Image (cartoon, helix red, strand yellow):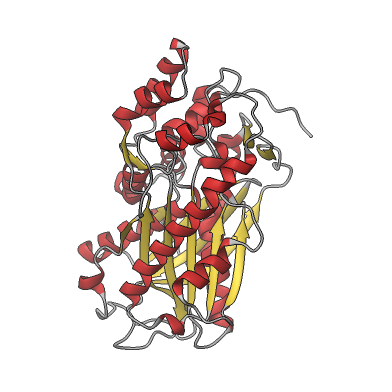
Amino acid sequence: MPHLSSPSLSDLIHSGLYTHPILFLFKLPSMSKTSCEGSAMLHHERARRAPTPGKAAILAIGKAFPSQLVPQECLVEGYIRDTKCVDATVKEKLERLCKTTTVKTRYTVMCKEILDKYPELVTEGSPTIRQRLEIANPAVVEMATEASKACIKEWGRPVEDITHIVYVSSSEIRLPGGDLYIASRLGLKNDVGRVMLYFLGCYGGVTGLRVAKDLAENNPGSRILLTTSETTILGFRPPNNARPYDLVGAALFGDGAAAVIIGADPVAGQESPFMELNYAIQQFLPDTHYVIDGRLSEEGINFKLGRDLPQRIDDNIEGFCRKLMGKGKLVDFNELFWAVHPGGPAILNKLERTLRLKSEKLECSRKALMEYGNVSSNTIFYVIEKMREKLKREDGEEWGLALAFGPGITFEGILIRSL
């Protein structure tokens, strides 16, 4: 395996692809905040463009969060206090990072009450994987369940009409998995087809869309509930100058869940398709598996990041996009809409420069990052929700791309058609 150099804070924040860092909060979690924004206005609204027969489309969307909303300006003092950090240089670094990320607010499960119950979480080197899972496993299921309820409400059809569930998470470990708990809580039929996608990191949401698309198009009449849910609990730890990437996480990442209903041949008058999943591909870059290196240990999840990550993505992104665009005979990047997972501001800036995109093209990604932080696999759905509103409001482009990047190095992309 090639040598992993220790990245600087600047390298880490510029990559925007570290997947499980720490986050922090100040009060005990309660029922998740849920949303199916715009559903009353959009439900059963006629599509501007006719759906393609047999092609999968997104029929509804929802999201959910822990109850704690953390303003970025409150993060540093609380984190330093509750992790009992006395190193002034750590505080200074975190303050700089919080400004660099462009994040304004985030939701998170971690809070002072949890740290009071599990003080060992802030003790360096403590074997705490059991405690972390006691917190994370129920938290991600609760958030996924609430996001799914919001999505089903917008969809408007009975829950019994769901034929498959695809569940994506890098934040829980157990048997049976969260897919069974979510299906039971929602009252899905006991013969519902279940698919679990574990530990994919930031590209997991787009992978879920690709899998749901294949299920929908190969099972006529099927309706797939895709839900994602993430918390940073498994990666939480006290600051350490030997782990600068932990501070990047504290400044950038958040918790939450999302859900969409996917199906082909939407029922007129009952369903409101808004984005058609035209063509999907996944690609890994050979000999880059060491660049994002995550390992589960007795202390939780530990990550290392290679310095060459941003350049690897930059060297390959244009060809990847061209491959997707070729299926629709599309040529001009600026004639598309762009739903890009906002791993961090620098990765968006680099993509914008490399592809020579107009500044407004990544507006939805930047807004999602600002409002929620990087929420790993969920974040692409927060971008898509904002893109739905923008395209409707501006009578926008017909074709676009949904993109996400993560460990592997893996690229996921879908050519999307706005309906």
Q: Is residue 364 left or right of residue 134?
A: left
Q: As drawn, which residue projects farthest toward the front?
A: 117
Q: Which residue: 27% across, 80% down?
A: 44
Position above or below: 291 against 63: above
Q: Which residue: 37% across, 24% down?
A: 76
Q: Position of residue 352 (x, y in %)?
A: 41, 43
Seen from the viewer's position, the closer of residues 375 and 146 is 146
Give the quadrant of the C terminus.
Answer: bottom left
Position above or below: 143 against 54: above
Q: Which residue: 53% across, 72% down?
A: 165
Q: Position of residue 127 (x, y in %)?
A: 66, 33
The number of discs equals 0
Position above or below: 385 against 232: below
Position above or below: 34 against 66: below
Give the quadrant of the N terminus.
Answer: top right
Seen from the viewer's position, the closer of residues 25 and 72 is 25
Q: Which residue: 55% across, 23% down?
A: 244
**Figure quadrant of residue 400:** bottom left
Q: Position of residue 320 (x, y in %)?
A: 57, 54
Q: Is residue 205 left or right of residue 289?
A: left
Q: Is residue 127 left or right of residue 369?
A: right
Q: Position of residue 161 (x, y in %)?
A: 45, 84
Asked whether residue 327 is in view, the answer is no
Asked whether residue 209 is in view, the answer is yes
